[in-house]
């Protein structure tokens, strides 16, 4: 499952690089003004080479999807196999299609698909394949991860509002404008913490405080939101991208670690 998720992420990154180069949306990202260069636009990788990389990652994503679905539904009826195979195909198509093909990112649907596939589909779907049982509450941590992923995307789009508008890329941030997109950023982060907290509180058994390890990231996200509200130029937003992405990973790891510890040692003292 880790390889499957990683292949989706890598495919999304490479396809986005190629698609934005072809539309001209990435021409500003050549390493100037403190903004990190994109591979094809900067000439680091030829367009033909990136195209081959996208094709290879598409093949690997489909392969890992088939292996994951085959293993996860091995004791279930064929309907489950077909259903999850379909989800895997949709996830692969979504990873490719942000700026290639349908290019739904240019139509303002990027946030929806990021929340859906990074969130409930990825989290609740993985839970079902591993446990072969459905738990509606798993939608909540799924949403929290999806909201965080959308926050990373929104920061990227906040940075690129002017150039996206010139390239005809009508992202949600571009449609809303920077002030509303900053408010949207705040709502995404707050909703992520609310969804996770509600998930922990609503679990069948009252958990220990270690389930709240994810709360250690609150100061980091609070600082990031403060800097987001103060940011004015594309480089300002660009400098926030990597920290926010790393904080999102830390949030998910601490949440999983806390739940794992409490699932096995909830009755034991904290220290």
Image (cartoon, rainbow, N blue to C red):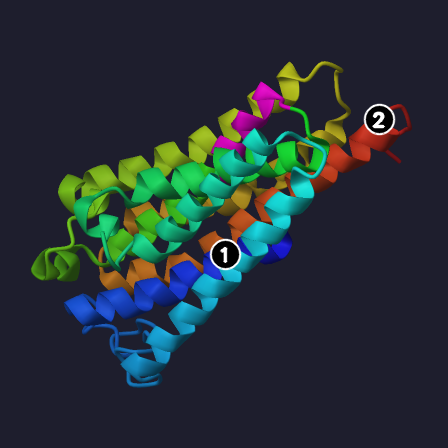
- Image position of 239 with respect to 229: above or below: below
Q: Quadrant of residue 259?
A: top right
Q: Main secondary structure of the magenta part?
A: helix
Q: Residue 105 colored magenta?
A: no
Q: Position of residue 218 (x, y in %)?
A: 54, 39
Residue wearing tag 1: 62
- Front-lying residue, 155 or 85: 85
Quarter location, residue 12: bottom left
Judge by depth and name the residue closer to the eye, 255 or 119: 119
Badge 1 or badge 2: first in the primary sequence: 1
> How many discs mark residues in the rendered view?
2
| Residue 258 shows in the view | yes
User: Around disc 1, counting alpha carbons within 10 Å, would you say few (fewer than 14), some (14 to 19), or many (20 or more)?
Assistant: many
The answer to whether 12 is drawn above or below residue 149 in the figure is below
In-front residue for pair 227/41: 41
Report the span colored magenta: 134-145
Residue drawn where x is 87% and y is 31% of the image: 265
Q: Is residue 50 above or below residue 253?
A: below
Q: Nearer the viewer, mark 1 or mark 2?
A: 1
């Amino acid at each position: 499952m880790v390889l499957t998720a990683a292949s989706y992420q890598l495919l999304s990154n490479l396809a986005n690089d190629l698609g934005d180069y072809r539309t001209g949306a990435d021409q500003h990202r050549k390493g100037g003004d403190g903004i990190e260069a994109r591979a094809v636009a900067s000439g680091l990788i030829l367009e033909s080479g990136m195209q081959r990389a996208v094709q290879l990652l598409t093949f690997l994503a489909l392969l890992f999807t088939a292996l994951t679905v085959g293993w996860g539904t091995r004791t279930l009826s064929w309907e489950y196999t077909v259903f999850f195979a379909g989800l895997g195909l949709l996830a692969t198509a979504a990873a490719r299609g942000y700026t290639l093909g349908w290019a739904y990112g240019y139509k303002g649907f990027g946030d929806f698909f990021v929340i859906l596939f990074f969130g409930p589909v990825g989290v609740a779907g993985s839970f079902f394949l591993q446990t072969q049982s459905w738990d509606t509450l798993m939608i909540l941590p799924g949403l929290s991860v999806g909201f965080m992923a959308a926050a990373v995307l929104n920061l990227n789009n906040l940075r690129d509002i002017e150039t996206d508008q010139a390239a005809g890329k009508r992202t949600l941030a571009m449609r809303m404008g920077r002030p509303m997109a900053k408010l949207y950023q705040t709502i995404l982060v707050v909703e992520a913490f609310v969804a996770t907290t509600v998930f922990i509180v609503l679990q069948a058994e009252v958990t220990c405080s270690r389930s709240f390890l994810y709360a250690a990231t609150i100061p980091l996200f609070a600082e990031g939101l403060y800097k987001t509200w103060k940011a004015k130029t594309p480089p300002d937003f660009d400098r926030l991208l990597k920290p926010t992405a790393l904080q999102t990973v830390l949030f998910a790891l601490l949440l999983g670690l806390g739940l794992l510890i409490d699932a096995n040692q909830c009755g034991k003292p904290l220290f």
